[in-house]
Amino acid sequence: MKPRPPLLDPIAWRTVWVFAMFDLPVETKAQRRAYARFRKDLLEDGFSMMQFSVYFRHCASRESAAAHIRRMGLRVPAQGEVRFLTVTDAQFARIQVFAGKRRKPPETPPAQLEFF
């Protein structure tokens, strides 16, 4: 069986989620400003807060996810560390959320319209 060209392979069109997880210092005023700026940049780029220092964003394709990761990677403050993780829509749907002793349903994926 011949492999399909990437554009015809349905897996290539799967949507993905990008997670940004970070530890940024906030000891000095300059560090707090850098933290706030980075957080604001994430929000302006379409990320939403999942937990403190964990943000996520839906992307229509792997290429779109890579572009957002590159863009946000350039905005990482000089001090601290940021990790980006991509997961498929199916993997994201399997998230289990627990709060206290009761289980919460995972967040509903946002209705998002993207133009190419």
Image (spheres, rainbow, N blue to C red):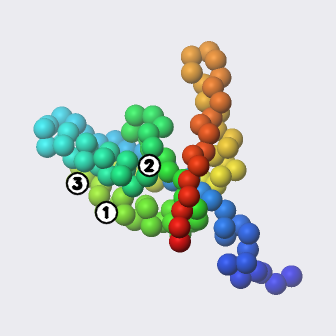
Which residue is most to the left?
29
Could you give the CA–CA distance between mark 3 and mark 2, rounded to whole angstroms? Answer: 21 Å
Q: Left or right of 33: which side holds 87? A: right
Q: Nearer the viewer, residue 14 or 80?
A: 14
Residue 29, by quadrant, is top left
Q: Amino acid at mark 2?
A: Phe
| Residue assigned mark 2 | 47
**Label 2: few (<14), some (14–19) or many (≥20) C-alpha neighbours in 10 Å:** many
| Residue assigned mark 3 | 78
SS at badge 1: loop
Q: Which mark is residue 19?
A: none
Q: Which mark is residue 74?
A: 1
SS at badge 3: loop
Q: Nearer the viewer, mark 2 or mark 1?
A: 2
SS at badge 2: loop
Could you give the CA–CA distance between mark 2 and mark 1, rounded to whole angstroms? Answer: 16 Å
